[in-house]
Image (cartoon, rainbow, N blue to C red):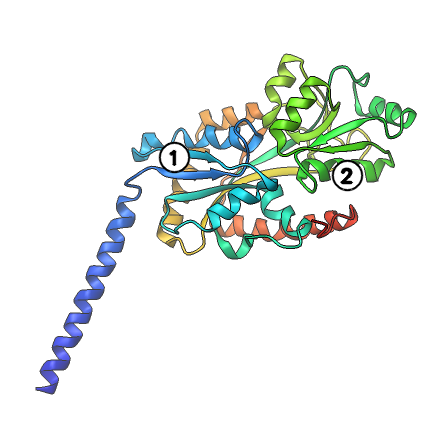
Amino acid sequence: MKHLLLYRLTLSLAVALFVTHAGAQGRVADYPTRPIRVIVPQAAGAGSDIVVRAIVQRIPETWGQALVVDNRAGANGIIGIELAAQAKPDGYTLLYGYTSALTINPSVYKSLPYNTLRDFAPVTQTVANTIALVTHPSLPARNVKELVALTRARPGEIYYGSAGVGNQTHLAAELFLVESGLRMLHVPYKGSTAAITDLLRGQVVLMFTPSAAVTPHIRSGKLRLLATCGAQRATAFPEAPTMVESGFPRTIATGWGGLLAPAGTSSDIIQKLNREFARQLASPGLRERLNSLGSDAVPTTPEEFGALLKSEINKWEAVVKAARLYHTQ
């Protein structure tokens, strides 16, 4: 009798486990069955917003479900990232993160409502972004050498904009100022869209910024591109020298964007997302579109993206300390 009861109990448990596993497999196989929200912690029209929209608009052709961009700007990206960290880990809320918000903020702010490595599951890096040094055409400098001479002649009179204190757009400028020994006045804005708007008006005359947000203005002549900040010349701007070529070998800054899910999201969903984004990022049409914005498609595995996050946190911590911004907010 005991053997019979044990047999029935074992059989029931086996059936229950099979049904649960089959149900989970079925849910992952069917995923997504409704639209997916992609939180972008920047305003519409900012660099990361432009890039992610170019990527996600292609995915409904495969899955039949829209990826809806939800712009949640403010507080150097903190507002949007906190919202994503608190979302249900079911694959229907994702975060499009970038350098400043995920790997610089931890060194600038004494406390954050999120922990990049603890609260998120990496899905894939999507792009590497060109950081461009652009000026308003009213500034009488057509290259970095002329900018240096002008700034030395007018110390503390040149205003440069950034997307906020401690943002990569700020720290890239700090790298240049430390290396050159120049003095400029920093005007931090609440996001890159506001900063670029004032740059176009000539309220500030200089900015280091991801090129995706300013490429149309460079092409139209509304802004002047002096240099890019990568180790090599940018694909989108092969005619523009790098800061290294311009005599500043330590002023190297590149940005990146990537997709993350709230911690606890099923690894099967993570892998399915990773495969689809890798497929899209490999397509010549999308690569061409991203190149035109100054971004290079860089699909990775979740593990590779996780390793990048860790290394970037360490790298920018050193820069933040050198700029004396460490945990100042």
Three-letter code, disc 2: Glu
> Along the line of sight, which residue is nearer the eye, 17 or 201?
201
Residue 202: give x, y in percent of width and height.
73, 19
Quarter holding the N terminus is bottom left
Residue shown at 69%/22% (left/top)? 199
Judge whether 29 appears above or below 16 on screen. Answer: above
Which residue sits furthest bottom? 2
* Sequence-first tag of 1 and 2: 1
Q: Total marks drawn?
A: 2
Which residue sits furthest left? 1
Q: Residues within 10 Å of mark 1 (few under 14, many from 20)?
A: many
Q: Residues within 10 Å of mark 2 (few under 14, many from 20)?
A: many
Q: Secondary structure at mark 2?
A: helix
Per the rendering, the mark at residue 174 is: 2
Residue shown at 61%/41% (left/top)? 76
In the picture, measured across the screen, residue 219 lies left or right of residue 84, that is: right
Per the rendering, the mark at residue 306 is: none
Residue shown at 54%/55% (left/top)? 117
Q: In this orientation, does residue 135 appear?
A: yes
Per the rendering, the mark at residue 67 is: 1
In the picture, measured across the screen, residue 164 lies left or right of residue 140, that is: left
Residue 226: give x, y in percent of width and height.
74, 23
